[in-house]
Image (spheres, rainbow, N blue to C red):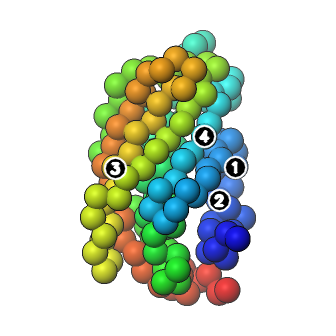
Amino acid sequence: MMHPIIQKYIEFNNYGKDLGLHFDIVEPGVVNHYLTIGQKHLATPHTAHGGVVAAMMDAVLGVAALSLVCEDMKIVSTVEFKLNFLNPCLLGDELSGESVIDHRGSRIIIVSGTIRSVNRNKVIAKAIGTFNAYPAAKAGLIL
């Protein structure tokens, strides 16, 4: 059964829906994200806009952190993340994003992530991010 905070995240995350992002929570802190690059993601005739990869990476990192703290009735906000683009993301790429929790403090969570093109066997991007955990009620999430 999915945690109610995760259900609310899915319900309210219209940007992720518009991009076509999907995810599976393997366990708290371990989340796999998926996105297939289509025409709407392109910046050139063959290559996705870097903002699509950045948005996916923010989700890869952020949902991992969220899945770690939702049992404590907390949500997270992105403090910062550094993103390295390693290969272009092409039309038709089937992207998979994976995360690793590097540090969990009482409020600050550090997460690393990798986005790969599964069909081309290429690493598209790597990142590290910092997230602030705070009470869900403070964001207006009443469950």
Q: Is residue 24 above or below residue 37?
A: below
Residue position for label 1: 17
Q: Note whether residue 61 is visible.
A: yes
- Between tags 1 and 4, which lies in front? 4
Crowd around label 2: few <14 · some 14–19 · many ≥20 (10 Å): few
Nearest the camera: 3 or 84?
3
In the image: residue 93, left or right of residue 98: right
Q: Is residue 35 above or below residue 46?
A: below
Compute the Cα span from label 3 to label 1: 23 Å
CB atoms of marks 3 and 1 within 8 Å: no
Number of numbered discs overlaid on the protein picture: 4
CB atoms of marks 2 and 3 within 8 Å: no
> Measuring 67% from the left and 69% from the top, which residue is drawn there?
2
CB atoms of marks 1 and 2 within 8 Å: yes
Mark closer to the chain start, 3 or 1: 1
Q: Secondary structure at mark 2?
A: loop
What is the three-letter code of the residue carrying label 2? Asn
Q: Is residue 32 above or below residue 90?
A: below
Q: Secondary structure at mark 1?
A: helix
In the image: residue 103, left or right of residue 26: left
Residue position for label 3: 112
Residue position for label 2: 13
Q: Position of residue 112 (x, y in %)?
A: 34, 49
Q: Secondary structure at mark 3?
A: strand
Residue position for label 4: 34
Mark closer to the chain start, 2 or 4: 2
What is the three-letter code of the residue carrying label 3? Ser
Nearest the camera: 55 or 43?
55
Q: State which quadrant residue 82 falls in.
A: top left
